[in-house]
Amino acid sequence: MTEIIGVTFPIPKSYMGRFFKGKTVFIKPATCFKEIQPGMKLVFYQSREDTGFVGEGVIAEIAFDENPLNFFTRFGNKIFLSSDEVNQYLEYQDHWKSTRRRKGNVKKKPWMALVLKDIKQYSNIEKPERFVPVGGQYIRK
């Protein structure tokens, strides 16, 4: 099996530029995270329009929390989304009952924060060999 060197997640084009203008914390519901660790890359996959890999950052820290709004206390305005945008997302998810059920108990899926350093934008969009699912995928050597 090949070595995992990073991870990629789709990010809408409308949010992508924020990483190249000073935002250094990527948050999302925790998926595709068990194999990642500090020092690996997060490769930015731009979705919806002009799709492809547009840049990368090195993962400096990984944090988890059941309430994504708690990340704003810890990371403040370094997060690429605003607290209003996260609230809108949470309301949308509540509408669809995005929870895991175990033995009658409802448990919300944890969120993760990837703190990035050495963020760089590629000069050209690089097309992936295959589709990048919403849950993300590992990048292998």
Image (spheres, helix red, strand yellow):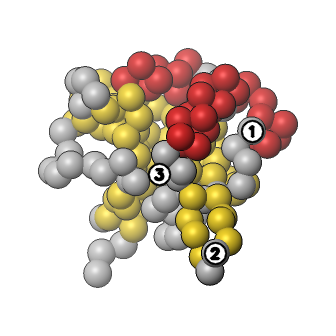
Most extreme residue toward the left is: 129
Q: How far apart are marks 2 and 3 (CA)?
A: 38 Å
Mark sitting earlier along the chain (1/2): 1
- Quadrant for the C terminus in the image: bottom left
Mark 1 to mark 3: distance in Å? 24 Å
Q: Is mark 3 on a helix, strand or loop?
A: strand
As helix, strand or loop, the secondary structure at mark 2 comes to loop
Q: How far apart are marks 1 and 2 (CA)?
A: 26 Å
Name the one closer to the observer, 75 or 111. 111
The nearer-to-camera label among 1 and 2 is 2
Report the residue marked by disc 1. Answer: 69
Amino acid found under the numbered disc labelled 1 = Leu
Q: Is residue 94 above or below residue 111?
A: above
Q: Which residue is drawn at 58% across and 43% down?
A: 94
Residue indicated by mark 3? 41
**Residue 64 in picture, x, y percent from top left:** 69, 57
Q: What element carries label 1?
A: loop
Judging by the rendered image, the residue that carries numbered circle 2 is 104
Where 75 sits versus 17, above or below?
Answer: below
The x, y position of residue 14, in whole percent, is: 42, 19
| Residue found 28% across the figure and 49% down from its top | 132
Residue 18 falls left or right of residue 10: right
Q: In this view, does 102 lie above or below 120?
A: below
Q: Nearer the viewer, mark 1 or mark 3?
A: 1
Q: What residue type is labelled 2?
A: Gly
Question: Residue 93 appears in which quarter of the rendering?
Answer: top right
Q: Which residue is drawn at 35% across and 58% down?
A: 137
Q: As drawn, is 110 to the left or to the right of 46?
A: right
Between discs 2 and 3, the one toward the N terminus: 3
Nearer the observer, disc 2 or disc 3? 2
